[in-house]
Amino acid sequence: MRELQRCPWCGADPMYLRYHDEEWGTPLHDEQRHFEFLLLETMQAGLSWRCILGKREAFRQAFDGFDVAKVAAYTEIKIESLLRNPGIIRNRRKIEGAVKNARAFMRTAEEFGSFDAYIWSWTQGKPLVNHWRSMAQVPSLSPLSDAVAADMKKRGFSYVGSTTIYAHLQAIGVINDHLKSCYRWKELSQP
């Protein structure tokens, strides 16, 4: 039996393989998952994605199952308790940024009807399908991520630079950056 061809970035790490095969690049339309992915992407800034994925369950527990309303209501007491949690990234600015982002997420969702409607409005509700043949071709940002990042900053989000937002758009399937040789590219490119 022939082994599936995957994007080379996932290597042989079982955690990365599962993430690549089941989540990365799959169009996402669930509000709670949107907030989860955004929180994790913003926590990742300056760190490896492997580090964040390895702490994902600890983040889930620490941040109330990624319940955006609960995170938006966090007080200084809760922030202090998170700073003592050895299972997560204990960076005050990132934790305060997560609370700020939860509030901005809720305002944006209220304005657009959902955060999903907001984020997918940038591509008229359809994934952008790229046709990369090598990882060297895959950019780390784009005019789209520049525009989304600038707009999100205006809406009060933090830790949302263009590179972070490009990675976020890839993760939630707004941009399909699986290599053309990867079996997931074909699956996700079907209408």
Image (cartoon, rainbow, N blue to C red):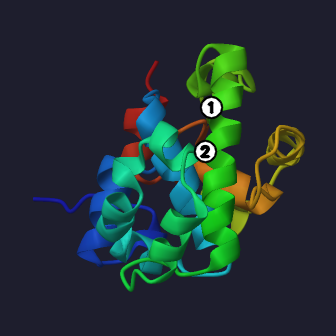
Q: Quadrant of residue 45 in the image?
A: bottom right
Around disc 1, counting alpha carbons within 10 Å, would you say few (fewer than 14), some (14 to 19), or many (20 or more)?
some
**Residue 135 at what x, y percent from top left?**
61, 67
| Residue, far front | 77
Q: Quadrant of residue 55 in the image?
A: bottom left
Q: Image point 89% across, 45% down: which residue? A: 150
- Residue 25 numbered tag: none
What's under tag 2, amino acid-wise?
Ala
Image-based side of 103 in relation to 150, left or right: left
In front here: 112 or 168?
112
**Residue 59 at what x, y percent from top left?**
39, 65
Picture layout, residue 64 above or below residue 40: above
| Residue, far top | 113
Report, in whole angstroms, how far the alpha carbon at label 2 lies from the one at label 1: 6 Å
Q: Image point 21% across, 62% down: which residue? A: 3
Q: What kind of element bears circle 2?
A: helix
Q: Image point 43% across, 24% down: which residue? A: 190
Image-based side of 173 in relation to 24, left or right: right
In front here: 38 or 185?
38
- Residue 102 numbered tag: 2
Instruction: Give the quarter of the figure containing the N terminus.
Output: bottom left
Around disc 2, counting alpha carbons within 10 Å, would you say few (fewer than 14), some (14 to 19), or many (20 or more)?
many
Whether pointer 2 and pointer 1 mark residues with C-beta atoms closer than 8 Å, the reply is: yes
For mark 1, what is the residue?
Answer: 106
**Residue 7 at what x, y percent from top left?**
45, 63
Q: What is the number of callouts on the image?
A: 2
**Residue 96 at what x, y percent from top left?**
66, 64
Q: Image point 71% across, 39% down: which residue? A: 104
What's under tag 1, amino acid-wise?
Met
Please indicate, yes or no, whether residue 25 appears anywhere in the rendered image.
no
Q: What kind of element bears circle 1?
A: helix
